[in-house]
Image (spheres, rainbow, N blue to C red):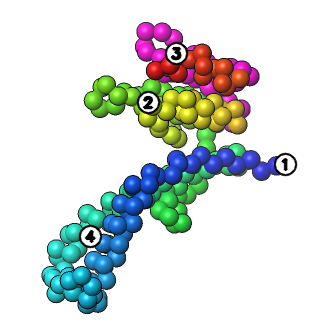
Amino acid sequence: MKEKQIIIFQGAKANWQLVMAAILFTISFFLIASFFVKIEILYLEYLYYAHWMPKLFLLSFILPLAINNSSNTLYSFDLNNMLYKKQFSVGPVRFGKWKKLQSIEYISIYRQSLKNGSEYAYDINLWLKGKVHVTIARYSELFFEEAFKMGYQTAETLKVSYLDSTADYSRDWDWIELDKKLDLLINNHPLSEI
C-alpha cells in the first residue's frame, strides 16, 4: 500500500520579518556572550561589566521576538496510521509530536471577523468527528482566492467534503462539489470580486 502523507506549510515569513529576526538573534547572541566574555567591538565591552539582571531582562524580551519573527507552523498528516502532527519550526529546528487523528468529516473555509470588525480573515478548518476542528491556515481578506484553493485542494486530497462558509449569515452556506473546475468556482464566487 502506498504511504499517504500530507504536509501543510504555513508559508515563508516576509523578508522584513527574517531581517528583524536576524538582527534580534544577533543582539541575543551578544547579550548571552557578554555573560562570559569581554567583547571589544563597538563599545560592547560595557555589557561585560553590566549587572547580569538588566541583561537577562533585555534578553527575555529580545529572544521571544526573534523566535516569533522566524518561526513557522507545519501540519503533517499520516493517513495510513491516522496520525497528525503540528510542528513549530525555527530555522532547521522543529518541535512537535504525533497525535491520534480522529476521522475527518470535512474541510471548511470560514470568513472570520477580526477584532476591529472592519477587516476579515479566511480560516481553513479541518473538522473532525465530534465537531472538533483544527485551524490549519489563516489568510488575509486580500488573499481569498489562495485560501479557497488551499481548502479545495486539501479536501480533494483527503477525499472529504468542502464547506464554503464565507457568506454572511443571511444565506445558507454552500457545500462545494469537488468535481467542478476550481477556476470556475472561484470566478463565480461572490467574494472573488471584492
Q: Report the disc number at residue 190.
A: 3
Per the rendering, the mark at residue 141 is 2
Q: Secondary structure at mark 2?
A: helix
Q: Earlier in the sequence, mark 1 or mark 4?
A: 1
Please tell me whether residue 165 belongs to the stretch shown in magenta: yes
**Distance of label 2 from label 4 (alpha carbons):** 35 Å
Q: Position of residue 23 (x, y in %)?
A: 35, 67
Classify 181 as above or below 136.
above
Identify the disc placed on residue 59: 4
The kind of residue tagged 2 is Glu
Residue 1, disc: 1
Name of the residue lying farthest toward the right: 1
Q: Nearer the viewer, residue 127 or 145?
A: 145
Nearest to the eye among marks 2 and 1: give it. Answer: 2
- C-alpha separation, residue under disc 1 versus residue under disc 4: 50 Å
Q: Nearer the viewer, mark 1 or mark 4?
A: 4
**SS at badge 3:** helix
Dot 2: within a 10 Å radius of its alpha carbon, few (fewer than 14), some, or many (20 or more) residues? some
Secondary element at image label 4: helix
Which numbered mark, 1 or 3, is in the foreground of this view? 3
